[in-house]
Image (tube, rainbow, N blue to C red):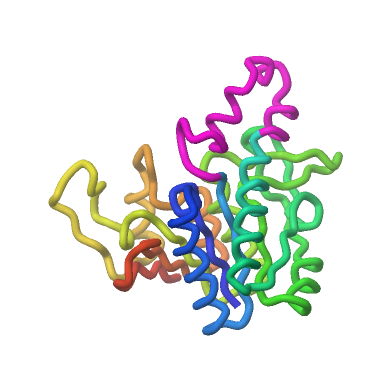
């Protein structure tokens, strides 16, 4: 089985989600079981993005627990929409969220850490359906409260699940065809890497908009999980990051 992670750009509208569905279908054909991790729909000013949800009230500055509960809804909405559209396309699936996902967190609201992953319910669900959808960016703390795990935390969710479930690799779908030597929106002097080690990857993540959250990449390096970064709309090979 594999884990596939779709970010806000991949989830932003019906047309891009059709591409996501095609990748899920291909993943099921090749690997039989696919765990899908999603981010909130869109970015910035988009209505269901994390930033937009944070601006619903300035009172969130007085309650980080309430703020985390609100922004976690972005990934939950994305999961529900993708689940319905997969069913429409003939792909049975199940959404597991909150305590069902088995992701336990600790630390501070807004920047929690994953303390444990219990994949038992996910494994049980895979006996009934080959596709399980997990909202990224969040877990449950020891008091049963929703806690988010930092900007870009859906990347960490995908890799933590990949480790716990012993997936062959984790796939990331981006608006670029792979890991590039520089930001293609800033310069034309870029090239795509076919393969990298984790140590080669790390310096490339020291930017304002890293292709993968650095905390997630460090987790993958520690757990020796292969990553495959590829374009959501591209048919060319992406970039492998290997232990």
Residue 81, magenta (yes or no): no
- Residue 70 place in picture, x, y as percent: 69, 33
Asked which quadrant contains residue 232, the reply is bottom left
Residue lying at the far front of the rendered structure: 88
Q: Total marks drawn?
A: 0
Residue 132 shown left or right of residue 243 in the figure: right
- Residue 168 place in picture, x, y as percent: 55, 77
**Residue stretch rendered in magenta on the structure:** 41-70
| Above or below 113: residue 3 | below
Q: Which quadrant holds the N terminus?
A: bottom right
Residue 191 shown left or right of residue 99 in the figure: left
The front one of 41 and 174 is 41
Residue 53, magenta (yes or no): yes
Residue lying at the far left of the rendered structure: 189
Residue at image coords 45%, 54%: 10
Residue at image coords 67%, 40%: 72
| Above or below 113: residue 169 | below
Residue at image coords 16%, 45%: 187
Asked which quadrant contains residue 73, the reply is top right
The front one of 102 and 56 is 56
- Residue 37 place in picture, x, y as percent: 59, 58
Residue 191 shown left or right of residue 68 in the figure: left
Q: Which quadrant holds the C terminus?
A: bottom left
Residue at image coords 73%, 54%: 103
- Residue 115 place in picture, x, y as percent: 72, 50
């Amino acid at each position: 089985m594999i884990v596939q992670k779709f970010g806000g750009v991949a989830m932003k509208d019906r047309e891009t989600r059709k591409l996501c569905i095609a990748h899920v279908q291909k993943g099921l054909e090749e690997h039989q079981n696919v765990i899908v991790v999603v981010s909130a729909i869109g970015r910035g000013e988009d209505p269901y993005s994390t930033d937009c949800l944070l601006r619903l009230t300035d009172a969130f500055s007085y309650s980080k627990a309430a703020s985390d509960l609100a922004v976690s809804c972005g990934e939950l909405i994305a999961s529900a929409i993708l689940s319905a559209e997969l069913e429409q396309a003939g792909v049975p699936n199940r959404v597991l969220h909150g305590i069902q996902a088995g992701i336990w967190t600790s630390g501070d609201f807004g920047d929690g850490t994953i303390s444990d992953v219990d994949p038992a319910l996910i494994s049980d669900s895979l006996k009934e359906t080959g596709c399980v959808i997990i909202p990224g960016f969040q877990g449950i703390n020891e008091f049963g409260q929703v806690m988010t795990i930092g900007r870009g935390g859906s990347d960490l969710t995908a890799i933590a699940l990949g480790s716990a479930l012993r997936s062959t690799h984790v796939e990331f779908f981006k608006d670029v065809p792979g890991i590039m030597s520089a930001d293609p929106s800033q310069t034309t002097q870029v090239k795509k890497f076919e393969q990298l080690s984790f140590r080669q990857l790390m310096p490339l993540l020291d930017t304002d908009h890293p292709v993968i959250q650095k905390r997630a990449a460090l987790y993958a390096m520690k757990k020796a999980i292969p990553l495959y970064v590829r374009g959501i709309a591209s048919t060319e090979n992406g970039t492998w990051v290997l232990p």
